[in-house]
Image: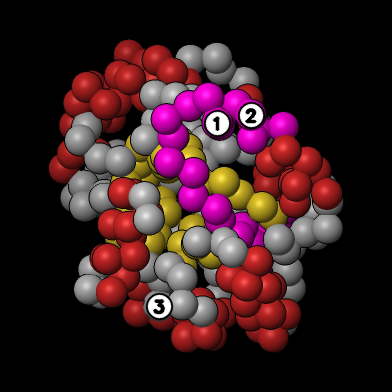
Amino acid sequence: MTDIYKQIVVSKKEAKKLLAILIDPDKVIWKDLELLTAKINQSPATHIFIGGSQVVTNRIDELISSLKQKVNLPMVLFPGNPSQISNEADAILFLSLISGRNPDYLIEHQVKAAAVLKATQLEVISTGYMLIESGTETAVERVSKTTPLDRNNLDLALATAQAGEMLGSKLIYLEAGSGARLAVPVEMIELIAQNIKIPLIVGGGIVDLPDIQKAYDAGADLVVIGTAFENDLDFFC
Ligand code: 1GP
């Protein structure tokens, strides 16, 4: 088992909850990087995720190396496509969008990324990525051209997560979408957490600290916060 993944598994075993701050490289205000890193260091974050559905900047390497100078947390790529691979990071969530039926996001991008990843030092963590309907169309839905899973169809969500686990995913990521109106339902988190063995990530539309706690209580092992921290660097204070 590789290091960052091993640490996530150990944390799950010890019931130590994890928190990732998601940084969208396009939204970083470079002149405020010092403040951003200071606020990250004051937060309870255990991981930094870096990525977005569509990133246009070509400064991802520079961003990660700048962050690493100030922040001593694992830097994990959370890419929308293979152009977001950076050898400056420590690991990559190697996502397959298993809730969707678009072959590009199930396997095509992964095939394109394989040789690139082999030439890096990145720890590759296979992740079953599930987009859950969240009230309005999100960037993931638009970009991936896939239909999210019905938020009320718990059986289908569970079967999808279990299929991902059986296919060899090391993590399941329940995603409502960045800036989602509705977060992933707690009943869905509970059902899936109780019926898979691998760690469970939950993100999208989580806007306050009680919501984070609700996701943890339901069984999320790692919660991802993007928009709320982006909009308010004092979110965790
Ligand atoms: C998106 O799950 C992440 O991929 C975070 O979503 O921006 O809504 O926090 P938010």
Mark 1: secondary structure: helix
Instruction: Specify the segment rendered in magenta.
Output: 112-138
Pinpoint residue 175: horizontal percent, then vertical percent: 58, 59
Circle 1 sits on which residue? 118
In this picture, residue 48 sits left or right of residue 82: left
Q: Between tags 2 and 3, which lies in front?
A: 2
The 10 Å Cα crowd at callout 3, few under 14, some 14 to 19, many 20 or more, is many
Q: Dot 1: within a 10 Å radius of its alpha carbon, few (fewer than 14), some, or many (20 or more) residues?
A: few
Amino acid on which disc 2 is placed: Ala
Q: Is residue 133 magenta?
A: yes
- Residue contact at pointers 1 and 2, CB within 8 angstroms: yes
Residue kind at label 3, given as amino acid type = Gly
Q: What residue sits right under mark 3 in the picture?
A: 219
Instruction: Look at the numbered disc 3 and give the secondary structure of its residue.
Output: loop
- 112 displayed left or right of 186: right
Task: Count neighbours of disc 2 (C-alpha within 10 A) and say few if under 14, some if 14 to 19, many if 20 or more.
Answer: few
Tell me: is circle 3 under 8 Å from ligand 1.
no
In front of the other: label 3 or label 1? 1
User: Residue, x 22% and y 73% (percent of image)?
Assistant: 14
Q: Is residue 17 above or below residue 28?
A: below
Marked residue nearer the N-terminal end (2 or 3)? 2
Tell me the number on the disc at residue 115.
2
Q: Where residue 205 appears, x then y in whole percent?
A: 51, 57
Quick one: SS at disc 2?
A: helix
Judging depth in this view, the residue of 29 and 113 nearest the camera is: 113
